[in-house]
Amino acid sequence: MKVKYCISLLFLLLPKFAIGNNIATTPTLSALTTIAIAAIEKKIVVPKDAKVKITPQVIHSAQYIPACLGQIEARLASNREIKRNNTVKITCDSPELDYPWQLFLNVKVDVLFPVIVSKRLLGTGHIIGKTDVGIAYKEKSSLRGQQQVELSHVIGARLKRRLPANTPLFDNHFCLICEGDTVTITASTGNLKIKTQGTALNDGNLGDAIEISNRYTQKKINAYVSDVAQVTIRL
């Protein structure tokens, strides 16, 4: 699976310190940060279509960094899956110290998922148009509901509540068919297709089963939302 990484800081390339020889070199702060990011990237499993934003703790220039002899190692401080907040342990042997030097670096990991968001403030009752919404990546902890990812599933829907700009669109924010709407009922079997009119008795979005009152017979039936003002009966 191809993973897309979105790193919030710009880092320099690793310095040219030798690995596995007798030359001791003091690593740069950017090199230590890059090593910490690599430790996260090595272990993280990213869901399909998601992006990852990795934000390491800033290492201040006053932090003591000794000369390192040989390989610098970085690993997760605890043996667990990558979480939003992680601690990376960086260690190396140093001729300046009688013991291995170590640095604990906090690294924040945001997993971002594509969702439909409002491009501007939209009011209650607004009919969603193509220019009203778009796709943005949002951190998974902010997505507490059945979010939408297909623009075609929301165009023409009516908002149930006011929606500020850049807000993820969830199923409970809108209805593709709303209670009281006039709908076209389509029933088909084989080559036979029958259409009639009805009234929605409750709200529904694409694929939802809702109750419809046939306009002519007044009989209540269950149908599935197939589009704006369109429902189908499965025979």
Image: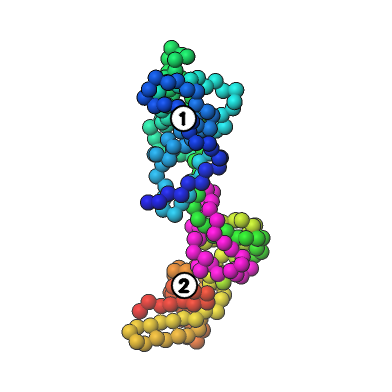
Which residue appears at 61% of the width and 65% of the height? Answer: 132
Q: Depth check: 30 or 88 in front?
A: 30
Q: Is residue 132 magenta?
A: yes
Q: Is residue 104 magenta?
A: no
The residue singled out by tag 1 in the image is: 16
Task: Estimate the x, y position of residue 12 in percent, counting from the top left.
Answer: 53, 36
Question: Which element carries disc 1, helix, strand or loop?
Answer: loop
Would you say 51 lies left or right of 192 here?
right
The amino acid sitting under disc 2 is Val
Q: Depth check: 102 or 124 in front?
A: 102
Which residue appears at 39% of the width and 35% of the height? Answer: 80
**How is the model colour-coded?**
rainbow
Would you say 54 lies left or right of 81 here?
right
Query: CA separation, marks 1 and 2?
Result: 62 Å
**For marks 1 and 2 on the same chain, the one whose residue lies earlier in the sequence:** 1
Q: Depth check: 157 or 40 in front?
A: 40
Question: Which element carries disc 2, helix, strand or loop?
Answer: strand
Which residue appears at 48% of the width and 31% of the height? Answer: 15
Task: Estimate the x, y position of residue 149 in percent, counting from the top left.
Answer: 49, 61
The amino acid sitting under disc 1 is Lys
The residue singled out by tag 2 in the image is: 225
The magenta stretch spans which residues? 126-155
Residue 39, placed above or below residue 202:
above
Q: Residues within 10 Å of mark 2 (few under 14, many from 20)?
A: many
The answer to whether residue 176 is visible is: yes
The answer to whether residue 86 is visible is: no
Task: Estimate the x, y position of residue 169 in percent, counting from the top left.
Answer: 55, 59
Q: Depth check: 178 or 7 in front?
A: 7
| Of marks 1 and 2, the one in the foreground | 1
Task: Estimate the x, y position of residue 86 in percent, counting from the top left.
Answer: 47, 34
Residue 13, placed above or below residue 200:
above
Q: Residues within 10 Å of mark 1 (few under 14, many from 20)?
A: few
